Amino acid sequence: MSVGEEVRAEQGRPQQSLGTSAARNLATTTKSAPQMQEISSRWLLRMLPWVNVQGGTYRVNRRLSYSVGDGRVTFVKTGDRVQVIPAELGELTLLRTYEDQEVLGELAQRCEQREFAPGEVLASFGSRADEVFLLAHGKVEKVGTGPYGDDAVLGVLADGAYFGEQALIDPEAIWEYTARAVTACTVLTLPRRDVDQVAERAESLRDHLQQARAIPEQRTNKYGEKEIDLAAGHTGEPDIPGTFVDYEATPREYELSIAQTVLRLHTRVADLYNQPMNQTEQQLRLTVEALKERQEHELINNREFGLLNNCEYDQRLQPHDGVPGPDDLDELLSRRRGSKLFLAHPRAISAFGRECNRRGLVPESVEIAGNRIPTWRGVPIFPCNKIPVSDTRTTSIICMRTGEDEQGVVGLQQAGIPDEIEPSLSVRFMGINEQAIISYLVTAYYSAAVLVPDALGILENVEIGRWR
C-alpha cells in the first residue's frame, strides 16, 4: 500500500484507482548495466606505447657504462635508534660489487647516528671531507657558490640518500659544497678512519677500494658510458683514432608479468537470467575492468618493473619548498629531452594548481580523447590514482619520455595469445564442474621497460596537504 493509500485508509475513504505499488508488478523496469566504482581513467595504459614481445622476454641493450651505484640506502628504526642494513651499504658506488657481508656488517656497526636541526650545517665548503653521510630521515640541500658569488642551491637530498663517499678513498678530498639541513635530519656518518681500520684486517675490502680508485680514470662521457674516440677540427694528415662501441655484457631482460583470476558462473544463471542483459558478458566485463586496474597499479608500483621503483637515483628530484611548484616541474622537464607526459595523483595536481594560483599563473589545458587535461610547458599532466599517497600526505609526480624510437618508456605485451579478447588479454573456458558451475580463466600479460635512464624522472616527497 502506498503512502497515499494509507492516508486515505486512515481517513476512511475507499480507494478509487489502482495503486502504483500494485501496478509495478505488471510493469517492465528499465535497468542500467552493472556499475563499478573502481573503474578509473587509466591514462597510463592509454598513453603508453605498447611493444609486442615474442617469447615473453624483452632485452634492453645499452652501451657499456661505468657508472654504478647511485641507489637508495635502507635503514631500520628501533625506538629512536636508527641502523643501516649492512647489505644496503652495497648501494654506495664504491661498495656496489663488494659482497662480504661480514665486513659490511662491521662497517654498519661503526656508523654513528647524529641529529641536525633545521638550518644546521652538516659539512662546510672547503673543509676536509673525512666521512660519508647516510641520510636516514629529513631533507638536506647542497649549497654552492653561484656565478656572481652568491649562494646557489645545487640539489636537494631526502631519505635514503648519501653523499661524501669520495672521502673513503681520497685522503685529500675536500667538500665542494655546503650541506645544510632544511628540516630536522637524522643521519648516520661513516668516518674514513673506521673504514681504514676495517680494511687493515679485511684484505678483500682493501683490494676492493684500490680497484675502486681506478673506476673514475675510465674515459667516459657525462652519462658514464664508455667514450667513443673521435677527432675533429684537425688539418693535415694526423693519426685518426680508432674506436668501437662497446655494449653491456649482461643487458637487463624484462619478462612479461601476469595478472589472473578464475571467473565462476552457475549455469542456471547463465541459462535463465540473460534478459535484457547477458549475465556472462556483464560478469566478464567487470572482471576485465578490475584486471586492467590491477595492471596499471602494477606498472606503477611493482618492485621489479614498476615505474616508481625503476627510476634511477640521479633522476629523482626533491621539491625545493615541499609543495609541487612550477620551478620543480621545470627542473623535472630539464632532466630529459622530449618529455611526453606527467603522471600525478589527483591530489598532487590540485596542490600544483594551488601553487600556480598563488603565483598568478594559469596553466594551459589540452583536449585529449574528449577530456580537458592540464599541461605544463605543453606537456599534459594526467591523473593517476595508482600513485600512492603516504600517511604524511606526500606523493610523487612522474615525468617520462615514451616510445622505442625516442629511447623512452614502453609497455610490453604479447598479442595473439589463445582466446584473446584484447591484445595480451585472454578469456579461456575451463569447463563445467559437477556443481554446474562454469569457469573462465581471465589472464593479462604485461610489463614496462625503461630504455635509457633519463627517459623516466620522479619528483618525490611532494606535499599535498599544505595550504598557504
Image (tube, rainbow, N blue to C red):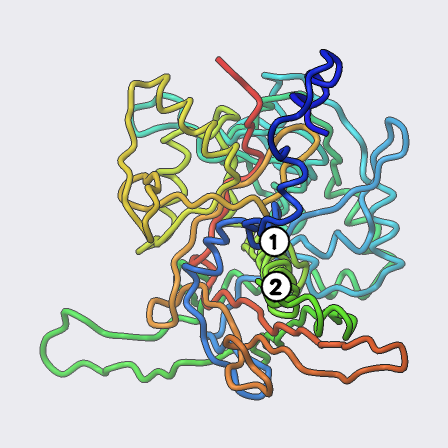
- How many marks the image carries: the answer is 2
Q: Nearer the viewer, residue 388 or 170?
A: 388
**Percent position of residue 29, x then y:** 58, 49
| Residue 35 located left or right of residue 268 | left
Q: Residue at 42% of width from left, 54% of height from top?
A: 400
**Mark 2 touches mark 1? (CB < 8 Å):** yes
Relative to 151, residue 10 above or below = above
Type of amino acid at the residue the image marks with label 1:
Pro
**Percent position of residue 416, x then y:** 52, 86
- The image quadrant of residue 311 is bottom right
Relative to 274, residue 151 above or below = above
Q: Nearer the viewer, residue 360 or 280?
A: 280
Mark 2, residue position: 282
Q: Nearer the viewer, residue 49 or 213?
A: 49
Mark 1, residue position: 34
Could you tell which of marks 2 and 1 lies nearer the N-terminus? 1
Q: Residue at 78% of width from left, 48% of height from top?
A: 195
Q: Residues within 10 Å of mark 1 (few under 14, many from 20)?
A: few
**Percent position of residue 433, x then y:** 85, 81
- The image quadrant of residue 82 is top right
CA distance for labels 2 and 1: 7 Å
Q: Which mark is residue 45?
A: none
Q: Secondary structure at mark 1?
A: loop
Relative to 405, residue 151 above or below = above
Q: Nearer the viewer, residue 303 or 258?
A: 258
Q: Quadrant of the N terminus?
A: top right
**Percent position of residue 253, x then y:** 59, 77
Type of amino acid at the residue the image marks with label 2:
Gln
